Amino acid sequence: VPFTSTYFNIDFGVDRIRWDLKSDSMNLYAAGGRSQAPMIIQSADFYDPQDYRLLSGDGFSFHPLNVVASYARSMGVHEFYAIDLATKIKRKPDEVKMAMNFLAQKGMIDYNAFTGFVKVKEKAFHFVNANKGTSDYDNLKILSVTDGPANATINFPDGSMTKRGVEEFKVSDSLNVVITPDSSVITLLKDRDIKFDGKITAGNFEINGKDFMMKYDSFFINLNHIDSIRFYITETNAK
């Protein structure tokens, strides 16, 4: 089940958290290093059509996410019991409970399997709205794969998260902007701002440098120290 950070405004999945209570930092690990799935960070406003299709699940007679969001809105609530949902949509309680477990694993709801209590997260409504085209969204998804060291370290004094094992990540699909950090390390700051050294590829431009800062709200990148700029020309009908 993904964790949520309202400070960084992200969701992230890890297998192990290690925190020495005498330390001013906390380490996050994805189990198994390079042989296993990576640690994934997603923006709170992330949306991908393929992810939405996968949220239909396997073997359900209804789309779990659509049904939950629709029921919550029609009833004017964010919290309810699975048995009440089953009664409303006229489905077997066991199937509805399986669907709630599925959505909880995907980070769309909080679900107590013993009581059947469901709490719908804002992310669920966001995905449904983005699929309908009525909500803005982003493509910010950062993968981390490491051998040995922690995938990420949260530093409490300066309110930052150092993430390792990041080969590259997309800032914008539509503008074709990709960041490739030096040493595969980035620093995540409050509200999804990102500090890094490395390369920015934007269309035909390639910019290399240090101490770059991506401001999430404006999607503006401060190029504090540029080492080089390359511009690639694509010829049409070249022989």
Image (cartoon, rainbow, N blue to C red):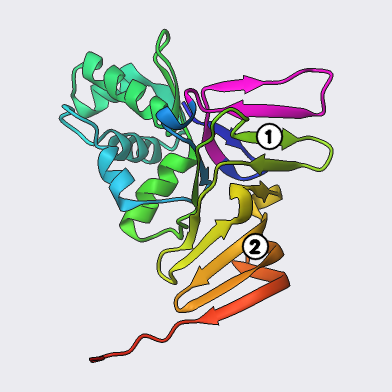
Residue at image x 45%, y 34%?
77
Q: Secondary structure at mark 2?
A: strand
Q: Quadrant of residue 75?
A: top left
The correct choice, above or below, for 203 with respect to 39 in the image is: below
* Nearer to me, 25 or 49: 25
* Residue 229: percent from left, percent from top: 60, 79
* Residue 70: percent from left, percent from top: 32, 40
* Residue 68: percent from left, percent from top: 34, 34
* Nearer to me, 218 or 77: 218
The correct choice, above or below, for 141 with respect to 135 in the image is: above
| Residue 238 in sight | yes
- Whether the magenta-drawn stretch holds residue 13 is answered as yes
The correct choice, above or below, for 66 with respect to 96 in the image is: below
Residue at image x 38%, y 55%?
130
Magenta stretch in the rendered image = 11-32
* Nearer to me, 88 or 19: 19
Instruction: List the residue tagged with mark 2.
Output: 214
Q: Which mark is residue 153?
A: 1
Q: Secondary structure at mark 1?
A: strand
Is 162 displayed left or right of 234 in the figure? right
